[in-house]
Amino acid sequence: MATFSTTGTATAPRRRVHRSVDTSLTLFSAAPNGLSELRRASPPPSANGRSLKPADNLVGIARLAASSPLQDAKRGTEYFVLPVRSILNRCNSPRVPFGWTVNPYRGCEFGCKYCYARYTHEYMELDGGEFERKIYVKANASALVARDLQDKKIWGDHIAIGTATDPYQPAEQEYEVTRTILKQMAAREGLSLSITTKSNRVLRDVDLLREIAKRSSLSVNLSVTTTSSSLARLLEPRAPRPDLRLEAVRRLREAGIDAGVLAMPIVPGITDGKEALDSLASAARDAGALWLAGRVLFLMPSALKQFIPFVEAKFPKLARQYREWYVNHGNAPEAYRREMAERMENLRKKYGFDTRPDRSGNADNAWRSPQLALALGTQMRGCTAAREVAGLPPIKRALKAG
């Protein structure tokens, strides 16, 4: 059976990284208004690293990205304005509990070493290593999401915000695409929404989140992989400290907003120790988190290309096992994943957590659809009536079935 060494240590300049000491004995022996109007910026440095192909030779999102204007450059990151056709994107995967996704940005400045979403840059003919250095800001978000939310196809489906890139990454401070989207959602009723982020910047939008929660089902997930600030800085270089994220959970709960913690990913040999996960679960409980969930690291090829060299440099004694586990498979062995699932379930029982949020609480809130009202000649109230007209099951039953 494959084993990891547990004696390797990370090397962070002037910082001591506290790694998990206890590991599995089974497997281890050792801009405003959504950029509808953009300010003119002084020409920043040239965009080295964009697709080498001329825009005319590209198609789809790659062509749009290649022709996107460079808006700004700072902190070693370039920001481009990306024209898009929609803000809501359909998700047909049976592996996820939502039907629609919203990612206000392409790319994420937090630069998490393990980020699975690096492959999305490849659709734009960019290397996954550019994921944190080239951020594409979706333009005209206000008008687009207002239109998207009128589409009856989304009625009764869950909308997940921040599935591939963080909606509260540093770019949000200036461009406010996420806030623009939330303003439109706050004007609707009967939505089912969740937000996932590593940033305490979510607290800026507590006013909007309260309004949304009054009229729709809303949950907020704070992603926290470790309570060690030094280890987090190594794994997630530009993300806020873990204590700031946990404080955000506490303040969201005080504001009456459902919030929980996602220990995702659980990084084998690095964040998976019993003491480390117990510390995280305890801190989440103290912050008032309603749920705790965790999932083992998964590495798509573009992420693997970045993560293996990182492990070789910072955790050299783990490198061989990572190559054996991940290079040809993308995932840890099933036995290890089961062990981690059991460990997380034991922690949920110990600290009284749910597995995930209950999304049916406000599902009967009415969503007034002007188009539907005009079509039927009456002021029909919301999603429930609309689904009955369409021959679909009531929202609560549909949510449970999903």
Image (cartoon, rainbow, N blue to C red):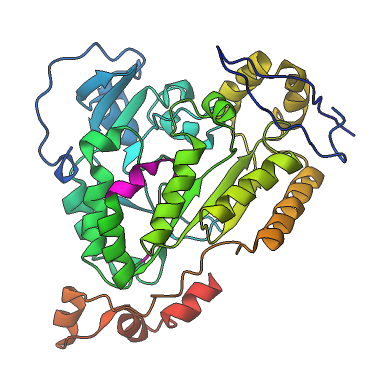
Residue 389 x/y as whole percent = 32, 85
| Residue 46, visible in the rendered structure | yes
User: With 377 as the anchor, is 149 left or right in this view?
Assistant: right
Residue 388 higher or lower than 299, as above or below: below
> Where's residue 83, x and y in %?
22, 38
Q: Residue at x 43, y 30 (%)?
A: 110
User: Is 234 situated left or right of 161 in this image?
Assistant: right
Q: Is residue 195 magenta?
A: yes
Q: Is residue 213 above or below residue 239?
A: below
Question: Of 313 and 13, which appears nearest the observer?
Answer: 13
Q: Is residue 22 magenta?
A: no
In front here: 158 or 28? 28
Judge whether residue 302 can be spotted in this image.
no
Q: Residue furthest bottom?
A: 378
Residue 381 image-quadrant placement? bottom left
Instruction: Measuring from the top left, give residue 313's x and y in whole percent.
Output: 64, 13
User: Which residue is rendered at x = 73% and y = 26% of the image?
Assistant: 322
Image location of residue 30, percent across then percent down: 84, 27
Q: Residue at x 63, y 50 (%)?
A: 281
Q: Nearer the viewer, residue 140 or 31?
A: 31
Q: Quadrant of the N terminus?
A: top right
Part of the protein shown in magenta: 192-204
Taking depth in this image into account, of 110 and 253 the one nearest to the observer is 253
> Would residue 252 appear left or right of 27 to someone viewing this image?
left
Which picture quadrant has residue 319? top right
For the point 20% across and 65% down, the residue is: 187
User: Count of labels shown?
Assistant: 0
**Viewed as shown, does residue 189 lie left or right of 10?**
left
